Image: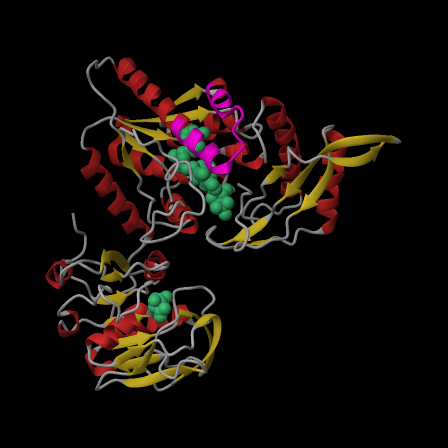
Amino acid sequence: MSLAGAADSTFDTVLVVDFGAQYAQLIARRVRECHVHSEIVPSTMPVEEMLAKGPKAIILSGGPASVYTEGAPQAPRGLFETGLPTFGICYGFQAMVRDLGGTVARTGSSEFGRTAAELGTDSVLFSGLPAAQSVWMSHGDSVTEPPEGFHTTGSTAGTPVAAVEAPERGLFGVQFHPEVLHTEHGQDVMRRFLYDVAGCRPTWTMLNIVEEQVERIRAQVGGKRVICGLSGGVDSAVAGALVQRAVGDQLTCVFVDHGLLRSGEAEQVEKDFVAATGATLKVVDAQDQFLTALAGVHDPEEKRGVIGREFIRVFERAAREVVAESGRAGEEVRYLVQGTLYPDVVESGGGSGTANIKSHHNVGGLPEDLRFTLVEPLRELFKDEVRKVGEELGLPAEMVWRQPFPGPGLAIRIIGDVTRERLEVLRAADAIAREELSRAGLDRDIWQCPVVLLADVRSVGVQGDGRSYGHPVVLRPVSSEDAMTADWSRVPHEVLATISNRITNEVREINRVTLDVTSKPPGTIEWE
Ligand SMILES: Nc1ncnc2c1ncn2[C@@H]1O[C@H](COP(=O)(O)OP(=O)(O)OP(=O)(O)O)[C@@H](O)[C@H]1O
Ligand SMILES: O=c1[nH]c(=O)c2[nH+]cn([C@@H]3O[C@H](COP(=O)(O)O)[C@@H](O)[C@H]3O)c2[nH]1
Ligand SMILES: NC(=O)CC[C@H](N)C(=O)O
Ligand SMILES: [Mg+2]
């Protein structure tokens, strides 16, 4: 199915040509933020196929290769003769320049991170923006000579040709990354290209995203039965609601109580989701199964693997029960809906050429013998976009704005082996932290606040004039836009003091409370 292409379509499409970038999805997302439809395509796609999608413009992404090395990906043959407005970013810029007869070389002056740039205000792309700007760089190669007919519109201390354009041909290129938040006027540059150069209309909305996904889900599952792993979190609630809109009562939601949940969570899912959507919900008590499988496992990746596998085993059992209960023996549930988001995929090493940071249980932690076909309507979106989709679907605000909680639950917040006793200790500490942060009105300011139990560490204390030898917990409040990067939250000291006091007074095993003041990167949000 292609939504794009029709001349009378109510929205315009931009193709993001992926050269193996870290940020291809981020480019696509910035285009969506301008209310323009975007689709990522591989750089190997023939131009005719691209044209068949009816794009209004093309953006060429960055990438890890060097344009002049053997086998480096090339700009699609004939692309620059199509007359389509084209914007090359980093590698995409270098590939464009090389293709059109300019030169690219390893000049010996790499730039990484924040860089001061001088941008020509007479440029179409930078018009109306300040001439001196802070931009985000990540390159080792540079353009040394623009192609004929292009003029240089930007430079930095290390890169004399940091931006070029041939506006009458609709061709533009920049060495920096306008798609990352740290590039001061990056989104303005995107707007100039999309609206002023390419004439795209800002008509692509969350409603379109919902309709696109509903159509896709129907095409994928047809009249078959589907189950959805429902966690009580934002992503699976939105995924489940989308699937329900698409295929109605072919859907059964399955909530797994794996014993790694926070206090009150199971009850809340049963109550809220069903009330909001009317969907059929099946609750599975799998506490013994997960705790047995996790016994003695302390390596984080191993834990994630065990949890991913056990989840699937539970879903398989639930699927058989759904069939049995429907009275249609011989039928099989082949489709499993998950609320997987793009950051889950990219962190699990599932982007093009990206590193594995941690295997999210729903992506990298899936077992090899997985027999379900996955339905993941949110796989290309970021959390804040998913929240908007949830609002569009009419889900209640408490559900849409709930803080994230990882599928592997408290297991990846106990540093060491996971036992029933340790889970109880952590659950008690976590409930106090959540209660006090909510009481202080900080729920929306804080992205989430993992409480981490250092179960293998003990510390000496003095309590009631006696010696204690307990465990520390770590508070990890963070602020974030999309969980790809994060900073530690500056929670008022009085609130921290109350939390610390209450935890050490009310949870006997804990005699020390510490605060994690690490951003992401270099830390991740969860400790494992
Ligand atoms: N306890 C659970 N029972 C059933 N499915 C689950 C459970 N926990 C996680 N999942 C599945 O794994 C997916 C990924 O979990 P994740 O925690 O990232 O998302 P979420 O819980 O839906 O949203 P949030 O990130 O807001 O917590 C979920 O969307 C859901 O499909
Ligand atoms: O469903 C999930 N399965 C997982 O395996 C998992 N690991 C981390 N998280 C959540 O993802 C976001 C980013 O977390 P990290 O900075 O720790 O990678 C944060 O919001 C984490 O809580 C997970 N969610
Ligand atoms: N981020 C990029 O696209 C880098 C392009 C190229 N690999 C360079 O180092 O210059
Ligand atoms: Mg969750």
- The quarter holding residue 219 reads top left
Q: Is residue 238 magenta?
A: no
Asked if residue 307 is among those painted magenta in the image, a careful observer would answer yes
Looking at the rendering, the stretch of residues picked out in magenta corresponds to 289-309
Q: Position of residue 274 (x, y in %)?
A: 41, 28
Could you tell me which residue is drawn at 46 percent across and 19 percent down?
Answer: 289
Asked whether 54 or 105 is in front, the reply is: 105
Q: In the displayed structure, does residue 490 sit left or right of residue 19?
A: right
**Do we see residue 272 in this rendering?**
yes
* In the depicted structure, whether residue 206 falls above or below residue 285: below
Relative placement, left or right, of 501 versus 317 is: right
Quarter where residue 364 is shown: top left
- Image height of 428 relative to 43, above or below: above
Give 381 or 137, whichever is nearer the viewer. 137
Residue 323 place in picture, x, y as percent: 26, 17
Q: Look at the picture and state if 320 lies above or below 111.
A: above
Q: Position of residue 268 (x, y in %)?
A: 51, 28
Q: Main secondary structure of the magenta part?
A: helix
Please give the name of the residue rendered at 20% of the width and 67% of the height, measured from the top-left corner: 75
Residue 32 placement (x, y as % from top left): 33, 58
